[in-house]
Amino acid sequence: MNDCPSNQEWKFSEILADPKIRARWEKVRKYFFMRESTYDMANRCNIRCEGCYYYEGDKQFAEENRDPAAWRELMRSEKARGITYVVLAGAEPSLVPELCEVCFQEMPLGTIATNGLKFIPESINYKIHISVWGNDATSFEIRKARNMLLRQIGNYQGDPRAVFVYTFTRNNIDQARQVAGILAENGCKLTFNMFSAPVGYDGQLRHTVSSLNQTRKIMTDLLEEYPASVLFSHYSAVAHTHQSGLHDLYSCSYPRMNPSTDIGLGRSFRQYRTDLTWNRAVSCCVPDTDCADCRHYASGSAVVTARLFRHAADPDTFKSWLDYVDTYLAVWVMGYEKGDNLCNHLVLPPGQDVF
Amino acid sequence: MSTERNVEKITLRVAEIMIEELKLEDVTPATFDPEIDLIDEVGIDSMDLATVALVLRDEYAIRIDEDDYPKLTSIRLISEYIDNKLKSVS
């Protein structure tokens, strides 16, 4: 049932009068202190995937800095300028565990994005996001790795750090059912990502309006089918499968698309290459992605969350936003437990009249 | 009431809301410097400012544009913004 009578202008205090909304608001706002930056840890990877954003643009040619002391110094200077959360990504962080360890020692909150083929030591207590791009036949086709899911589960089953991230492309939508079933059987947590084309990409993985609609349907089906395994919400599905990308919907706040340095991500976010340099003009969480096609889960986690103000419009829209933030925190923060979603139907993003 | 006195009253109330919502310590509404830069010197971020903007929208029954509140980086600027909004509706 829709909880927002038309034409009513809701006060924020009226929305918060619902005890469930108030409790969730108080739960998520404790994490508003998080300020992220991202770091390429190496220029190597043990596999090569079609459409990988790391191997687009010139960041792939940066020389690796493998000096732990330099990384420690970087983390300390990051902390000094207010960064409280790190994302260690590109190309494959598991190849440099000694550097990840240094980052964890200096910055206790963070996530590592990995293909999951090489185990990351438990002493590095970050969230571990393991990328899944379809069933094993598809993985072999586009990632050239055999038995990928089996090996990923073998490394991370029962590991509280692990979240499997299923990236929907145009060609693997139905395979998500099989993969979700296997992960649920093995007690693994799963969330969803959308393939977002790198600049100039002309391959078969790019989404169409039809594939976006199909993906939204299967996301919500799997959320209902595997509620204990799937970390997602109805609004997450809406935000990431809308025919407009995240920038058009929410106005991306990463420096690459946001010239303002006044406040928020435009002020504090940096994307470091593996040689420890950074360039404001290209800084975002998935550099070299085509911004118009960006529906990436990492991007949405910051961009949708930042739009608190426009979502505090009516109870349904605000509940949807709270579900989105609750999901993002469960996916990205160690120890954060996701609550039941407050809004279990599809709500349009503010200002939109189609999905 | 003169504009100056009105802005002063709003200033105190904004400081009170800011302290309560953001759980600021070691400061009272009376000692909160209205000129201090909330971003650089108090360490407030965009989510904090959005929260305060929502509470102020309720308190003064004014419309605040999403593009406006990130620019309101001191209590003085916020108070003048509210005062102008109130004048435009009265």
Image (cartoon, rainbow, N blue to C red):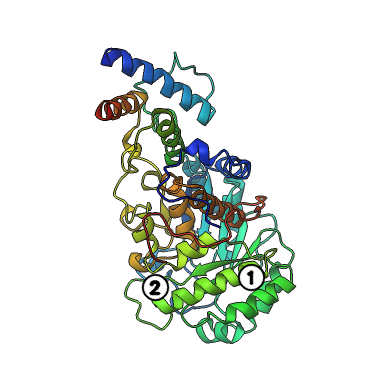
Residue at image location 63% in from the left, 73% down from the top: A117
| Host chain of mark 1 | A
Label 1 is placed on what type of residue?
Lys
A241 in relation to A299, above or below: below
B75 in relation to A53, above or below: above
A121 or B31, which is in the foreground? B31
User: Which quadrant holds residue A219?
Assistant: bottom right
User: Which quadrant holds residue A28?
Assistant: top right
Left or right, A197 with respect to A338, comes to left
Residue at mark 2: A197
Q: Position of residue A238 (x, y in %)?
A: 48, 64
Left or right, A59 with respect to A110, comes to left
| Host chain of mark 2 | A
Left or right, A326 with respect to A204, comes to right
Residue at image location 32% in from the left, 75% down from the top: A200
Furthest-left residue in this view: B88
B29 or A99, which is in the foreground? B29
Residue A273 is marked as none
Assign a secondary structure to mark 2.
loop
Label 2 is placed on what type of residue?
Ala
Residue A118 is marked as 1
Residue A45, visible in the rendered structure: no
Residue at image location 51% in from the left, 38% down from the top: A14
Mark in front: 1 vs 2 = 2
B1 in relation to A243, above or below: above
